[in-house]
Image: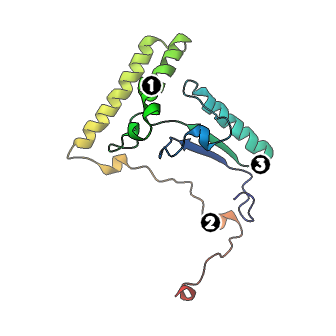
Amino acid sequence: MEKLNHFKISGLIHVVANNQIGFTTTPAEARTGLYCTDVAKPELVDQAMRLAVEYRLKFKSDFFVDVIGYRRYGHNEQDQPAFTQPMMYQKINEHRTIYSIYADRLVEEGVITKDEKKKMWDEELNRFRQSYNESLSTNFDIKKWTHTPFHRVVDLSQLGNIKNTGIDPRELK
């Protein structure tokens, strides 16, 4: 769209969260290029995003970041991905979690201690448990769980010369 009249935005960064839903083909068969990430190096996503920003600023053109992932437990509670991709899911089941790999690496590099790693894990687990328990309450307050409105919405008239692209409803009848 960036090349269309009235849609000039000087490039857009597209982030594709490719979690392989569908399993109709493997990533190696579906694409011709290298990926921006691999599961043992989460910093590569950050590097790819920084490259995307620099590219967009310099060339004023679109940039795609394809983040390849997987669903350890399938698409939903009725999905059993081992039926459609048995070899891949055997490997996934044998593979340590991303959290485990990354947290252990941070400990090895001295970024955090084992105690800090455990404390962070326990705090997040407790937060999840607390949220779950609150959701079971009969005093559940939906307002607490909804997102706050986005206050920086721009009125369309502020975007410049708006072209009338509609068709009179009488003409459609």
User: Mark 2 to mark 3: distance in Å?
Assistant: 23 Å
User: Mark 2 to mark 1: distance in Å?
Assistant: 45 Å
Q: Position of residue 42 (x, y in %)?
A: 57, 27
Secondary structure under the numbered disc 3 in the rendered image: loop
Q: In this figure, which residue is indicated by the disc labeled 3?
A: 60
Q: In this figure, which residue is indicated by the disc labeled 1?
A: 97
Left or right of 47 on screen, residue 173: left
The amino acid on which the numbered mark 1 sits, given as a three-letter code, is Thr
Mark closest to the chain's N terminus, 2 or 1: 1
The crowding category of the residue bearing disc 1, from other C-alpha atoms within 10 Å (few below 14, some 14 to 19, many at least 20), is some
Left or right of 15 on screen, residue 137: left
User: Mark 3 to mark 1: distance in Å?
Assistant: 37 Å
Q: In this figure, which residue is indicated by the disc labeled 2?
A: 156
**Circle nearer the viewer, 2 or 3:** 3
Secondary structure under the numbered disc 1 in the rendered image: loop
Residue ID at (79%, 42%): 58
Mark closest to the chain's N terminus, 2 or 3: 3
